[in-house]
Image: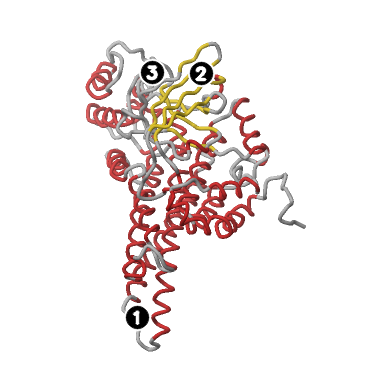
Amino acid sequence: MTNATEVRTTAPDARAVAGAMARIAIEVAAPVADEVDRLGRFPSETIDALRAEYLLSAMVPPSLGGSGATVGQVSDGLVDLGRHCASSAMVVAMHHIQVASLVRHGRNDVLRHFLGELVAHQYLLGSATTEVGTGGDVGSSVCAVDMAGGTFHLEKQAPVISYGKFADGILATARRSADSPENDQVLVLCRPPGLVLEQVGEWNALGFRGTCSPGFVLKAHGDAASVLDDPYADISSQTMLPVAHILWSSLWLGIASSALELARRYVQSEARKRPGATPTAAPRLAEATAIHLQLTEMVRGAVHRYEEAEADPERLSALGFAIAMNTLKVSASTLVVDIVRQSMVICGIAAYRLEGPYSLGRHLRDSMGAAVMVNNDRIMGNNAQMLLVHRGE
Amino acid sequence: MDETIRQVLVEHGRLAVDADTISDQADLFASGMTSHASVNVMLAIEDAFDIEFSEKMLKKSTFESIAAIRSGVLEMAGE
């Protein structure tokens, strides 16, 4: 027996996670998605709704109080959230990427304890991996961790921290020490009261406007054990990068699914007006549907590939795996734009209008973000480099 | 063999320290070798010793130190 006022005290079963996310997407995120986009405001109601149902700890293992949901289960939920509010979905995806990294690579007592707190208080985690002065290369840092007497200090100029003002903790990359080269990085959990963010500039972007992602100067200090146990290079290749590419692709699939659904409805309404005459846009709908199926299967395939390799750090670190996960990001971010663009041509002026039931402006703007967040050209450059030595699978 | 490995590291490792004097066991990645540089090191090692590393050798740990590179080269040359 449940009712609306009951406060849940335990995490939902992992199998219920995607369904609960989908319900919140429809009931909470969808009604305010246009407003979130127009005003560029944080989708607080979506995050609060997820908190109320203990869904921010979906990926925390049951031994620490979470649901222990798989990447695939969260991926399913994000497809639905992406369908209704891509900004909400991006915030939630980024949060789960941080949680997944902490779960696998934060093994010390302090970080384990923090994960327990995260479950109890449903903390929202953000990320500060880019830095002013590194030219967009997240594999190198300028700032360094300063350790003294069991306490770390860190100051970082971050050009972007998504939902920085709304996060309860931020995982930041930094050089291991002042003497370390730029690529010897660690990942540090920064949290209040030892975390201060000074905002630099505003977030007024084409899409994903609700992620509220301006620049910040991050100043943090705290327990030395806030530094995750594994080097960032390992965290990145084994967890952060594959999980990010899968969860992002999932919400891009959501955007594409929503656009295609509108296109389908449009063509069907045209068909009803003149039964017997195939609408002009119907063949294009067939084409767009084929691309959508490609994208769907690509995301599913990547989830399967990840879950198969998940328990084996060697497999997660293999070149073939990295190339596949990079390819997923580049391909998915390209296909989502294709599908939205085709859907726009199908619906015509009705989609081009910023208002009305077939408007696709938000979809188009959000989808364009996919190729620029971790730039596709950089990722393909990395793949090109790896292919110089890859022996094939 | 060590001299050749060190020569490759001087030319392609882009280490933050002197590749001629770095210890046998020192972590090359912690000494500034990027993953990009490690690929170049690997290509140059393959050329220098006329070998081809197998798929299972293509991991970070194969190139993490001079000692590791040496044993990798010996393993591939022995096959």
Q: Residues within 10 Å of mark 2 (few under 14, many from 20)?
A: many
Chain letter of the residue carrying label 3: A
Label 2 and label 3: CA atoms lie apart by 15 Å
**Residue highlighted by disc 2:** A152
Residue at the far bottom in the pictured view: A276
Residue A80, percent from left and from top: 52, 58
Upstream in sequence: badge 2 or badge 3: 2
Quarter of the image for the N terminus of chain B: give it.
Answer: top left
Upstream in sequence: badge 1 or badge 2: 2
Q: Is residue A239 above or below residue A280?
A: above
Q: Nearer the viewer, residue A303 or A267?
A: A267
Q: Residues within 10 Å of mark 1 (few under 14, many from 20)?
A: many
Q: Is residue A120 left or right of residue A346?
A: right
Residue type, numbered disc 2: Phe
Residue at the far front in the pictured view: A39
Label 1 and label 3: CA atoms lie apart by 64 Å
Which picture quadrant has residue A279? bottom left
Chain letter of the residue carrying label 1: A
Residue type, numbered disc 1: Pro
**Residue highlighted by disc 1:** A279
Secondary element at image label 1: loop
**Residue highlighted by disc 3:** A180
Upstream in sequence: badge 1 or badge 3: 3
Quarter of the image for the C terminus of chain B: give it.
Answer: top left
Residue B64, percent from left and from top: 38, 24
Secondary element at image label 3: loop
Residue at 67% across / 50% down in the picture? A13
> Does label 3 lie on the same chain as label 2?
yes
Chain letter of the residue carrying label 2: A
